[in-house]
Image (cartoon, rainbow, N blue to C red):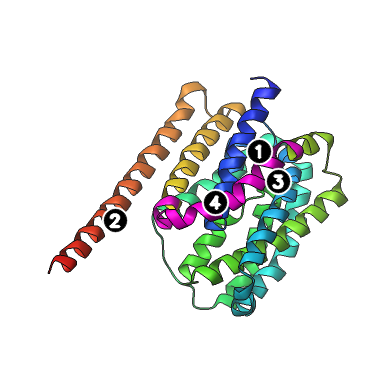
Amino acid sequence: MSTESELIILVFITLFAATVNGALGHGFSSITVPVALLFYTNRILNPALVLVEIFINSYILLMNWRGVPKVWKRVRTILIGLVPGIILGSYVLSSVHPGWIKFTTFLVLLPLILFQAAGLRKPIRSEHAVGLPFGTGVGFLYSITTVSGPPLALMFNNQGFVKEEFRAALGLIRVTEALLTASAYYYLGLFSVESGAILSSIAPSVLIGVPLGAYMIHRLNPETFRRLCMSFDAWVVGFGLSRVLIELNLVAGPAAYLLWFLVIGIDSYLLYQYFTKVKLKLFQSQKIKTV
């Protein structure tokens, strides 16, 4: 595939991802990265995405600023934990073979997405005790992949954050981790001409997509929209993981795609369960209205 074709695909996927982020408050990197890694390495892609994330998450934080005082004490240990995780992750990104970074990215993302799709709920009693190691893990993951939405969304949904608190907490953490990661990348010399070219290509998509998503979400069912986006994520990550297994010679040829088909099967089952529950709730609500 030519460089021009790769950039066109990247522009369209970032437009879609920015729209999702504008609608849900997260999702830009978790949608963009699995697709973009089919053409670029993390070392070239990440610096561009981190700069975009600073803008996107600053917008999300600004729109939900009133919720910050309500969540500040609950997330401060996570913010502290980000620092060592980002330092370590940035160093790993600069020194480890790109193929293994790709493999790690897909391998970590896949279960997180499927856990979200399954509607996993298991509240943690001691947020402050868990916050520091959780923040370190999130910082490490973000600095390697620029993705932290899935674990953060899983955590905050489990802890019962309401909509404004959820978005405020996400915005606060993700602005902080993006700024810290950009600083670490600059110190390690990871910004490059190639990253700059990617940034200039996707910037218009982001400027259009974020406000578009914020407008659209008022006309859609947020939970159904979120669930369909997770399915897209799972299928792309499954495909990417199969591809990188071949690239690293861990699995020979077509056999690697059995993993992708397995992911499709699991997600299709979870999607069926979700829509069955939605249909049941709709039926029950109509029955109550009739009575």
SS at badge 4: helix
| Numbered range of the magenta stretch | 200-225
Query: Which residue is denoted by mark 1 in the rendering?
Result: 100
Mark number displayed over residue 49: 3
Tell me where residue 185 appears, x and y as whole percent: 81, 49
Quick check: marks 4 and 1 in contact, CB under 8 Å?
no
Q: Secondary structure at mark 3?
A: helix
* Mark positioned earlier in the residue sequence (4 or 2): 4
Pick the residue in front: 57 or 131: 57
Amino acid type, label 2: Val
Which quarter of the rendering shows the C terminus? Answer: bottom left
Towards the viewer: 93 or 64: 64
- Give the label, 3 or 1, closer to the camera: 3
Q: Amino acid at mark 4?
A: Gly
Disc 3 packing (10 Å; few <14; some 14–19; many ≥20): many
Looking at the image, residue 182 lies above or below residue 160: above
Sequence-first disc among 4 and 1 = 1
Residue type beneath disc 3: Leu
